[in-house]
Image: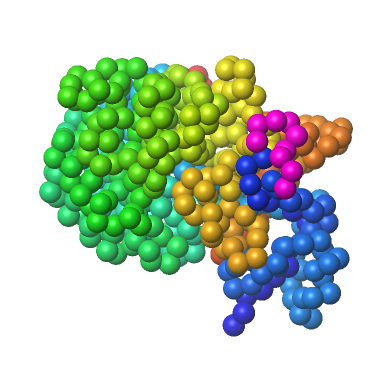
Amino acid sequence: MTDSRLLRGAVLTFDDDPGESPVPRPDSLRYWEDGAVWLENGHIHAVDDYTTLAPHVPAGLEIVDYRGKLIMPGFIDSHVHYSQLDIIASFGRELLDWLNDYTFPAECRFAERAHAEEVAERFLDELLRGGTTTAQVFCTSHPGSVDSIFSAARARRLRLLAGKVLMDRHAPEALIDTAVGGIRDSERLIADWHGKDRLAYSLTPRFAPTSSREQLDAVGGVLRNDASLYLQSHLSENRGELAWVAELFPECRDYLAVYERHGLVGPRSTYAHGIHLSANERARLAEAGANIAFSPTSNLFLGSGLFDRLATREAGVATSLASDVGAGTGLCGLTTLQGAYQVGALLGQPLTAWQGFYRLTLGNARALHLADCIGRLKAGHEADLVVLDLTATPLMARRTQVAETLGERLFALMMLGDDRSVHATWASGRPVHQRDASGTHAAPSRHMAHSST
Ligand code: GUN
Ligand code: FE
């Protein structure tokens, strides 16, 4: 049975990095005001003007009318913790206290498989509600937490990367694994999930302070044996963390050297944050081809610091964009873009909408070595899309109305949008979220009957 549809609406997709200037580089993007995306069996069959494509579609093909909306490739989140969904917006701590006070207790609950399964489903609901169709996900140290998110993603036909957190010290007893046991569990999970359907495995040593040298060495050994595996971790996020790493690993010249020493820095490595890096560390990351996941709402929320995106870029380091929920304050890519703009504004590096939307889509796909299958609306690519409503609120409608150019409209979307702007999300050629579907926003908005402080 074929599964085909034609989506009609404005269409925007990037072919390359548009650069940092308010005028995008020539040939870096395509835009069709009255465009169409022809989906067939989970893939994109063609993208063009509606009037060009319409005569070629078979009679009876379902046409989904998204006129007045903007169709883009599904957003990608390069770093997020699904286990922290329920502690998003927890008050008043910097990184290390936040981990101890909120994160570790929340992660302990994932020992229970039913809890992991329930959170996995709600997490994917929230991702799709925000237009994100692919993410690289931290689970917890419980193997069942990984089975739960992979099986939920597989059932929804999503492309997803995930891995079991490895940590054999400096965490609650209930979350700690061992160098040998952590690798044994990871290898079982790799065998069960890596390369199955749209899933890939990302080895996940939490960060240097919570792994022994033996554990880091063992992870390096697994990576060396299979170049298709990913790695995700944290690097240089917070000053207290940096001091702790220097104390724990006196043999290493800097934070990055801890990971290098154990063979953990390569082209499929994603390091979240990288805020307090030296020029020398940046040069080494560039050489290795690793990517830094810029997580602006997390960095602002935890007060971790301002990521110097342009210095990182000039050093030749690949950067990706991430929510880092639960330290991040929203799963929607638009929320991440607002944070990225604000961090950039404080550094005199304003982020253009072109650069922002490029990063959320093709840029992140490239950083994750997935650009041959996602991140673009292009024939042959997997059909993951987001349908955006630039008039989702009265204020957005007003701002969009007076905007004179596409660049201005996109900037207003980036700064004012959130999951209300996500009209629909499609994955593998099927609708997986509809904003106005009955039940999704069922709760009527009433004034609060009881107010308490
Ligand atoms: N560093 C080590 N673990 C974490 C985590 O869960 N979140 C963030 N933001 N940083 C970390
Ligand atoms: Fe993180």
The foreground one among 302 and 75 is 75
350 sits to left or right of 62: left
Q: Say which residue appears at 19% left-offset and 30% top-offset.
A: 170
Q: Relative to 92, say whether 422 is above or below.
A: below
Image coordinates of residue 277 in percent, x first then y, are 39, 23
Q: Say which residue appears at 27% left-offset and 63% top-offset.
A: 191
Q: Say which residue appears at 58% left-offset and 52% top-offset.
A: 375
Image coordinates of residue 99 in percent, x first then y, are 31, 28
The foreground one among 286 and 123 is 286
Determine the image quadrant of residue 4: bottom right
Residue 21 on the magenta span = yes
Residue 235 on the magenta span = no
Look at the image and give the residue range highlighted in magenta. 19-27
Can the viewer see residue 172 in this picture? no
The foreground one among 236 and 385 is 236
Image coordinates of residue 453 in percent, x first then y, are 50, 19
Q: Main secondary structure of the magenta part?
A: loop
Determine the image quadrant of residue 147: bottom left
Can the viewer see residue 312 in this picture? yes
Image coordinates of residue 248 in percent, x first then y, are 18, 24
